[in-house]
Image (cartoon, coloured by chain):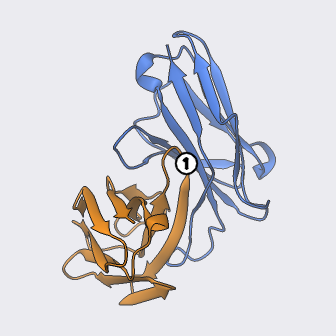
Amino acid sequence: KQEVTQIPAALSVPEGENLVLNCSFTDSAIYNLQWFRQDPGKGLTSLLLIQSSQREQTSGRLNASLDKSSGRSTLYIAASQPGDSATYLCAVPPPGGSQGNLIFGKGTKLSVKP
Amino acid sequence: DTGVSQDPRHKITKRGQNVTFRCDPISEHNRLYWYRQTLGQGPEFLTYFQNEAQLEKSRLLSDRFSAERPKGSFSTLEIQRTEQGDSAMYLCASSLGADPSTDTQYFGPGTRLTVL
């Protein structure tokens, strides 16, 4: 059974700092890994999708890496801003399956202080 | 706005009542998913559709829950005889459903259900 863990559960940093969020998964037979952002009381916004054949993906100040063999992904946020404050979730499809339903971690709640 | 929409955004009901939620996916998206999210947790998969066919249901989806996607367009999720434990955010997502390695799911704003 696939399990997704995110560490830390919460993180507070001053504005301008670079930071790393971690995601680990127990079964490496995945098609891809997605990172999402969720603002309080809102739906999820897709940030990045890394295919299983890729090592990293970049979008603006965000860089996500994937190491399938070790079951780990990181989301790097450069020059953090107060507007980055949100909960960040990672998710993977079931191992080896094409069903498409995602298995989520519990998220990391990020707070960027001005 | 061409994103995923959900209605209503908030629903307060009394225990034992039936509720129905609606989701309109991004047009031309073949797949539609329902998830449930409780406070402090990540979303949990409930069910998904490929066009009008319901292909998978989680064991979380008890017999009080039913979902439909007539004609492969919008979808409804109905909860009968609601219980306080049903209080949660119900999220809908859609995707093209073509290549599983690149299939990005796009989420709606969710429906917040409170059962009194």
Task: Determine crowd level at label 1: few under 14, some 14-19, many 20+ residues with C-alpha closer than 10 A.
Answer: some
- The reply to whether residue B38 is visible in this rendering is yes
Q: Nearer the viewer, residue B90 or A13?
A: A13
Query: Looking at this rendering, what residue extends furthest in the left direction?
Result: A70
In the rendered image, which quarter contains the C terminus of chain A?
A: bottom left
Q: Pinpoint the chain carrying mark 1.
A: A
Element on which disc 1 rests: loop
- The reply to whether residue A4 is visible in this rendering is no
Q: Nearer the viewer, residue B51 or B46?
A: B46
- Rendering coords of residue B34 (x, y %): 56, 45
Label 1 amino acid?
Lys
Q: Is residue B94 left or right of residue B41?
A: right
- Rendering coords of residue A87 (x, y %): 40, 57
- Rendering coords of residue B57 (x, y %): 49, 43
Q: Is residue B29 left or right of residue A80?
A: right
- Rendering coords of residue A79 (x, y %): 39, 81
Q: How many numbered marks are there?
A: 1
The picture's colour for chain B is blue
The picture's colour for chain A is orange
Residue found 51% across the figure and 43% down from its top: A41
Q: Nearer the viewer, residue A109 or A83?
A: A83
Up the image or down, A52 lies above or below A82; here it is: below
Residue under circle 1? A42
Residue found 52% across the figure and 23% down from its top: B114
In the rendered image, which quarter contains the N terminus of chain A?
A: bottom left
Q: Quadrant of residue A77?
A: bottom left
Residue found 76% across the figure and 51% down from its top: B72
Q: Quadrant of residue B94?
A: bottom right
